[in-house]
Every structure is written in C-alpha cells, then in structure tokens.
Image (cartoon, rainbow, N blue to C red):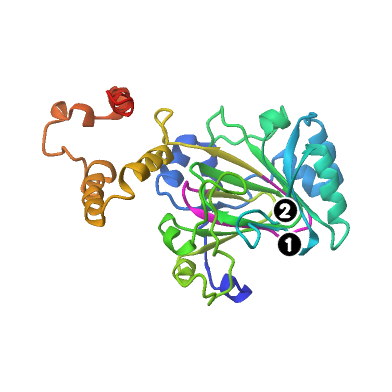
Amino acid sequence: MTAAARESMAYVAEVDVGVLGDAQRFRREVMEPCRPVVLRGAYTHWPVVEAADASPETFRTYLARFANDLKAQAFVGDPGIRGRYAYDDSHEGFNFERVEMGILEALERILANAAGPGSPTVYLGSLETDLFLPGFAADNRTAAVPPGVSPRIWIGNASNVACHNDNFDNIACVVAGRRDFILYPPEAVTDLYIGPIDHTMSGRATSLAAGAMPGDKRFPRLGAAAEKALMARLLPGDALYIPKLWWHQVEATESFNVLVNYWWDGFRIGPDAPDTAMMLAMIAIAERPPAERLAWRAIFDHYVFRPHGHPLAHLPEAQHGILGSLQDGNYGRIRAFVMQLLRGR
C-alpha cells in the first residue's frame, strides 16, 4: 500500500475518554455499536507509560519490578524482512524464527537492536501479564474492562503485523513508540484473501493481500477492501477500541515499541463461542449444494441473525419456549439439546 493511499483513508472517530470510567457506559456507547474508536490520551497517567516516556532504560527498570523467569516465544527476523512478519514465499513456512527467551532477555535484545540500524528484529507478543509480570495489572488499570481480565503486553522493534481479526473485544494502548492501525470491517473478509485458519503465525488467520501494492494481479478484489479501510495513528498514552471480528493490520513505526491490550467478550453468556458454531456449520452446511445452502442461510437469518426481529414476535412471550431469553434458563436447555444431538442420541 502506498503512502498516498494511506493518507487518503478516513480516520477512526475519536470519543470522550470519560467513557472508560464507567463499564456500563463503555458497553452501551462504544461496544454495542461495533465500530472502532480512538481514545486519545486515555492512559498517559499509567505508570508504565510514564516510565517508557522517560527512557527505554527507565521502562526496563520498571518492568523488572514485576518480571519473573518464565520463558516466552519471541519472533526473530533477519534485517531483510524489516519487521514484516509473514508467511514465506511458499506459504508453508514463515519468514522468521521462533525463539524461547525470558521477557527481560528479549527486552535487552530489542533495545540493543534499536541502537543498531540494520539489526535483526525481535517481537515479543501477547504475553499475559498476570503470568509473566505479576502485579503489573494492578499498577495499570482501566475501569472499562471487567476486573478479572488480565492485560497483555507486546514489546518489539519496528514491526508490521499481518492483517488479522480477533474474536474478542479489544482495547489496545500504546505505551512506547507509535503505531498505525489500518482497519477493515468484517464484511471485507472476501476481499482480503484470508489464508489458512489452521496454519497461522499466532493463532488467527491473516490476510494474504493487505499491504500489497494497488493493482497486484494476485488480489483483484483488494481495491474493494481498501475503499472500506479506516486509519488510526496512536502515540504513547493513546488507545484504540477494536470490536471483535474487525480486521486490523498493525505497524509499529519506531525502533522500540510497547503496547498493552485487553481482550474479553463483553457479550458472552456461557462457555460457547461463535467461532465454535461457525466450525460446526462448516462441516454441516459448507459443502451442501448451492441452492440448499441458500435455504439454510434463510433459516439462519430468521432464527439467529434476526434482521426482522424475534422469530416468535407474533406470539406472547410465554409461548416462546426455548426461543425465549437465554437468561431465563434457555441457554442451558439449548446447550443440553445440542450436546445430545452431537452424541447421536
């Protein structure tokens, strides 16, 4: 993607950071509309942001207060990839190595690389702070997220993380460096040329096309996705809310970068997840004849997606049976019925 194309993108809307102080307001005004928003300067008061703002060495001293000896998997890339972690040309492997190292060891390598132009790049991502940095979460809080949700930390040199989506709500806060996010709505999935869902860099399928130059003949539909793209540019202390299933490509532009994020599902009732339902639907429906798939789409729309409202709105609520509110015990009834069907009973 050219610099001119980026500059022509619409920017993600900014909202009052006051919504972060009230979980119910945040849910109502930010999460339910399912649109990304920027929360400018929301976390400049965090101790970790203040430490990183002072200097990388002050950040290292701050992190050492919490770090333990557990090892994590870091991505290590040759200088030639310039921090663009991706598949190799065959799409069978990747263009980086996975190396086990402790968080402080990784940080030392990242800081050393930052001081030497043309060095390899190291990227340590998605570390659950309760596991690797006990006590960090209590020192850096946000009221918008449920109390039991542990933040994760991402530390690295300049990097460009392949476009992907997540099945969780996400608040991402820049701690050090700068980050550009390019976001695409869920309906852009067809135009992004998504790769395998069971052979990924870090658990989520990625776009093979996002980041390609305009006119790339391998991806003729990419232009349609680019028309829907939004840009967010974040500085330290800024945050971005990314709704679940929104595709996002993340570029950390400085030689030393840190981000903290929270993942959670603000609308989950029980242990079941939409991804599970989709996988089951793939084996139950995806290879049936096209006309039958259209028929099932109509039934799914009626009972699940409900564009015209509740499927039994023409009857009194007392007659809705298991189609009544899931909060009234119907979640358990439906789940038990499905489990019986899966067991062949």
Q: Is residue 247 magenta?
A: yes
Q: Is residue 213 magenta?
A: no
Q: Earlier in the sequence, mark 2 or mark 1?
A: 1
Dot 1 amino acid type = Ile
Dot 2 amino acid type = Phe
Q: Residue at x 63, y 47 (%)?
A: 173
Q: Residues within 10 Å of mark 1 (few under 14, many from 20)?
A: some
Q: Nearer the viewer, residue 182 or 341?
A: 341
Q: Which mark is residue 81?
A: 1
Q: Which mark is residue 96?
A: 2
Coordinates of residue 300 in the picture (x, y in percent): 26, 45
Coordinates of residue 119 in the picture (x, y in percent): 84, 58
Q: CA distance from mark 2 to mark 1?
A: 8 Å
Q: Residue at x 85, y 38 (%)?
A: 61
Question: Which residue is farthest left?
Answer: 315
Q: Are marks 2 and 1 in contact (CB under 8 Å)?
A: yes
> SS at mark 1?
helix
Q: Residues within 10 Å of mark 2 (few under 14, many from 20)?
A: many
> SS at mark 2?
loop
- Specify the segment rendered in magenta: 242-259
Q: Residue at x 61, y 42 (%)?
A: 261
Q: Is residue 110 left or right of residue 269?
A: right
Residue 127, relative to residue 258: is it above or below? above
Coordinates of residue 231 in the picture (x, y in percent): 55, 62
Would you say residue 179 is visible in this rendering? no
Q: Nearer the viewer, residue 315 or 343?
A: 343
